[in-house]
Image (spheres, grey):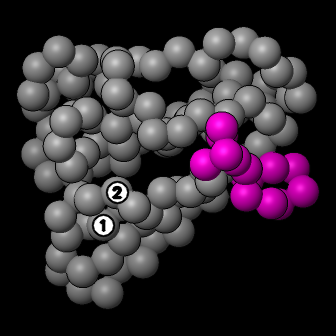
Amino acid sequence: MDALGLGAGPGVVRGRALLVTGDVHDSELLRAPVRANPAVLELTSSSIRTGERGDDLREWVPGSQVWAVQADAFAAITVDVRGPGDGAITLEARGADGGLLHARGTPCRTVWNLDDGALS
């Protein structure tokens, strides 16, 4: 996200972008900007350290983390586009058993409305 200029300033992304990444030893969803409907979401899914827990799950920028969890996990992405400006992307972290994971009691599931960028 730093490469897109999203850390301190408004950034250079036009429209909306979903980044799918790995290799941070946890599963998380980050947003930018943090104060408005996001233009960019970064979904990370990594099970490199399968089953390990206890590391601090640090935020990239304060307020950027939608959810984060350390577990045997994989990401699920569902794209539902019905027409121009009408659709949503659902982003989830699921455990090795296929069940939806929870972070601090909150489901690791977010729906990104493609029309206005709102998260639910």
| Span shown in magenta | 94-106
- Looking at the image, which residue is at 32% across and 87% down? 82
Looking at the image, residue 8 sits to the left or right of residue 67; the answer is left
Q: Residue furthest bottom?
A: 82
Amino acid residing under circle 2: Leu
Identify residue for label 1.
113
Question: What type of secondary structure mainly makes up the magenta span?
Answer: loop
Looking at the image, residue 32 sits to the left or right of residue 71; the answer is left
> Looking at the image, which is closer to me, 106 or 32?
106
Q: Quadrant of residue 47?
A: top right
The disc at residue 7 is none
- Looking at the image, which residue is at 31% across and 77% down? 87
- Looking at the image, which residue is at 89% across and 29% down? 51
Circles 1, 2 touching at the beta carbon (< 8 Å): yes
Q: Could you tell me how far apart the alpha carbons at marks 1 and 2 are, in whole angstroms?
A: 6 Å
Q: Quadrant of residue 28?
A: top right
Identify residue for label 2.
119
- Looking at the image, which residue is at 26% across and 59% down? 118
Give how far across and how far down residue 65 sits, in percent.
Answer: 44, 32
Residue 75 is at least partly visible in this image: no
Does the magenta-highlighted stretch encompass residue 102? Answer: yes
Does the magenta-highlighted stretch encompass residue 113? Answer: no
Question: In front of the other: label 1 or label 2?
Answer: 2
Q: Quadrant of residue 57?
A: top right
Assign the C terminus to one quadrant of the image: bottom left
Q: Earlier in the sequence, mark 1 or mark 2?
A: 1
Above or below residue 102? Residue 84 is below
Amino acid residing under circle 1: Asn
